[in-house]
Image (cartoon, rainbow, N blue to C red):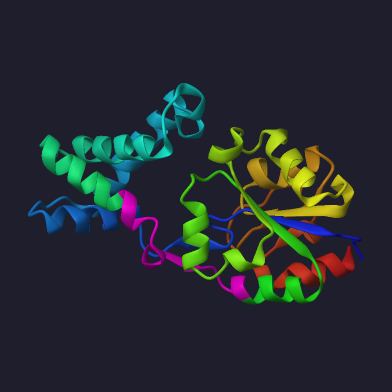
Amino acid sequence: MLRLRLLTWDVKDTLLRLRQPVGQSYSAEAQAHGLRVQPQALSEAFREAYGAQSRRFPNYGRSQGLSSKQWWLDVVRQTFRLAGVHEDGVLSLMAENLYRDFCSARNWELLPAAAETLSRCCQRGLRMGVVSNFDNRLEDILAQCDLRRHFEFVLTSEAVGFAKPDRRIFEEALRLGRVLPEQAAHIGDDYTRDYRAAREVGMHSFLLHAAGQGGHPDVPPGHVLPTLSHLLALIEKG
């Protein structure tokens, strides 16, 4: 059995996921303004706009003087421009609405067994925190989804200034948790940013990896979570 005192958690696609694809949400917003833009076109435009913005201004542009809100408003406006919408007034209004809407619980849903697993971990006396490449809306999103109460701290890459897989965000989590690396484990769905990055600072880690996804040959079966409900059994085995 692993002698753990602290669990740190990724959030997006580990505990919470979007209820519907981004393109559908953006298309519905456009329709509310009398515009018809296909969800698929918006999904493709979003991937392009998000990727370009992330390369130009990593981690929400924090080190370049941007706020995460401005960063996201620019992504939304550019998404619609790439999909053929160019009226500045409507672009700004839709961007503001979508930025606000994605802070609402109605756009997010819990992954299967998320709430139950967090409750069981608390009952076992495991302390918990969040380590997420997210912006400063995360606290509100977690609170609206009734998850914030489970965590001693919520570390976002925007607040800390370092994004996973940078070891410094994990080191800050260990400092806040007042534990040694070998007393902590991280749970996430991304091999590089979650599983490997946590292990590189000496923590244990588990990779949430649904059936049917391609495997990683250097992740032992005992470190793979087919669902979150497998977590405590793997901790007890380890």
Relative vertical location of residue 173 with respect to residue 145 in this rendering, above or below: above
> In which quadrant of the rendered view does residue 46 lie?
top left
Q: Residue at x 10, y 37 (%)?
A: 87
Residue 184 can be seen in this image = yes
Residue in the foreground of this view, choosing between 185 and 136: 136
Q: Is 77 situated left or right of 90 in this image?
A: right
Relative vertical location of residue 152 with respect to residue 157 in this rendering, above or below: below
Q: Residue 112's spot in the image, x, y percent?
A: 56, 73
Q: Residue 190's spot in the image, x, y percent?
A: 62, 48
User: Range of the magenta residues?
Assistant: 99-115
Give the tally of numbered discs: 0
Q: Is 121 situated left or right of 130 in this image?
A: right
Q: Residue at x 30, y 34 (%)?
A: 74
- Is residue 150 on the magenta stretch? no
Q: Residue at x 60, y 62 (%)?
A: 210
> Which image quarter is the N terminus in?
bottom right
Q: Residue at x 78, y 54 (%)?
A: 185
- Is residue 102 on the magenta stretch? yes
Residue 218 can be seen in this image = no
Q: Residue 221's spot in the image, x, y percent?
A: 78, 59
Relative vertical location of residue 34 with respect to residue 121 in this rendering, above or below: above
Residue in the foreground of this view, choosing between 231 and 123: 123
> In which quadrant of the rendered view does residue 153 lie?
bottom right
> Which image quarter is the C terminus in?
bottom right
Q: Residue furthest left?
A: 34
